[in-house]
Image: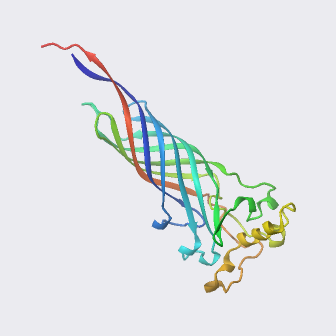
Amino acid sequence: MFAQIKSDKHEWGVQGGVMNYLGDLSPGMKISQFHPEFGAFYRFNHSSYFASRLGVNYGNISGADSIWDFNRTRNLQFFSQILEVSGMSEFHFQKFGFDKFSHTFSPFFCLGFNAFYFEPKTNYRATAYALRPYATEGQLLRHNSNYQRINWALPIGGGFKVFLNKNFVLGLECFWRKTGTDYLDDVSSFYPRQSDLVKFNDQRTLDERLMTVNLYDRSGERNDMNGNKNLSFEGKQRGNPNNKDWFYTIGVSLSYRVVKYSCKKGGF
């Protein structure tokens, strides 16, 4: 009698690494803006070349004008949590499996779709404020609606997988998400007129309306560059509405492949 692999289609795994974003407050990569992220996933192996993956991930992103020469005088900054649910298809570049006809390692490519939740906030005088309720670019004036905190993204990426043994698979991964929003950082288009901005909701308290003015233009907080003078005016560009925001993760995964065996009779 000897055992033979009968089924190895189901995998359960965890992953972890770092998360970052690209947008109006982060035109490139800075090590200081990487934050921990982690998640869990289920993978179904349709064949040695193709698999489907469902996962949930949590992480954080941030950006600040103060760390870039680009738009430093604008002086905006934000941070946000990201909670995403994703579905992806994985394609192996070579036959991947733990048998004599397959390779125990392979590069792979991923493409999929996800939904995610975000909530941009900023620190003002040692207090964190959620930015969306203040409609800092006058969204409620121009569109009579605000951006939504649940949005979609198209993840694309890949990496490298290797079998540690017949059950455990180690992966090195990098995934980019092109999102459907330009407001991950609460920055997208133009400065509104200040007087109009505080009138968008007459039901708000005076303190809340004053805070709206404080948060939509932070340039006056820089005495070293701006002399404590706000630099905004109605119609001045605050962000680039032509480019949607991105976020991405770099990390490792470890999954357990459920292997079933069948027994066959053997002879001498």
Q: Residue furthest front?
A: 126
Quadrant in which the N terminus is drawn: top left
- Asked if one can make out residue 30 in the rendered structure from this viewpoint, the answer is no
From the top left corner, tell me how far across and down residue 244 is, in percent.
Answer: 62, 57
Q: Quadrant of residue 144?
A: bottom right
User: Residue 237's x, y, as percent?
Assistant: 69, 71
Which is nearer the eye, 148 or 13? Answer: 13
Q: Position of residue 121 (x, y in %)?
A: 64, 62
In the image, 68 versus 190, the foreground residue is 68
The correct choice, above or below, for 54 with respect to 221 in the image is: above
Residue 124 appears anywhere in the view = yes
Q: Is residue 222 left or right of residue 29?
A: right
Relative vertical location of residue 103 with respect to residue 27 in this rendering, above or below = above
The percent coordinates of residue 29 (x first, y second) are 48, 65
Residue at figure coordinates x 80%, y 67% from the top left: 209
Q: Residue at x 42, y 52 (%)?
A: 251
